[in-house]
Image (tube, helix red, strand yellow):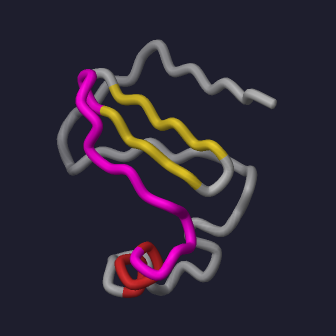
Amino acid sequence: NEARLIVRGDSVQHWLNGFKLVDYVLGDADWQRRARSSKFIDMQAYGKLESGNIVLQDHDEPVWFRNIRIRKFD
């Protein structure tokens, strides 16, 4: 799979294998409602930090990552 996250200000797009899966605005009413009903409800800083570490996850199966690139555009 090839994933791409495009973040411009508070606008976010998540693409997977050339297809846009999600298009949302960080912090808007819909996003807040979804965050409150998610497994991240107890993480106070979830989606609020402008910089920091990334986290790669698996779902209890072997996983490999390669060619990870993070670019910041001004």
Between 27 and 65, the residue placed more toward the observer is 27
Q: Is residue 67 magenta?
A: no
Outermost residue to the left = 61
Residue 66, quarter of picture: top left
Task: Give the extent of the magenta segment.
Answer: 16-30
Residue at position x 54%, y 64% from top?
26
**Taking 15 as reference, is 40 left or right?**
right
Residue 37 visible somewhere in the drawing: yes
Residue at position x 35%, y 29% from top?
3
Rendering coords of residue 18 (x, y %): 27, 22
Residue 15, quarter of picture: top left
Outermost residue to the top = 67
Identify whether 67 is placed above or below 72.
above
Outermost residue to the right = 74
Identify whether 10 is placed above or below 41.
above
Rendering coords of residue 14 (x, y %): 38, 41
Q: Quadrant of the C terminus?
A: top right
Residue 1 visible somewhere in the drawing: no
Residue at position x 66%, y 68% from top?
48
Q: Quadrant of the N terminus?
A: top left
**Taking 18 as reference, is 9 left or right?**
right
Rendering coords of residue 52 (x, y %): 72, 50
Identify whether 71 is placed above or below 32.
above
Rendering coords of residue 32 (x, y %): 47, 81
Residue at position x 39%, y 23% from top?
65
Identify whether 62 is placed above or below 31.
above
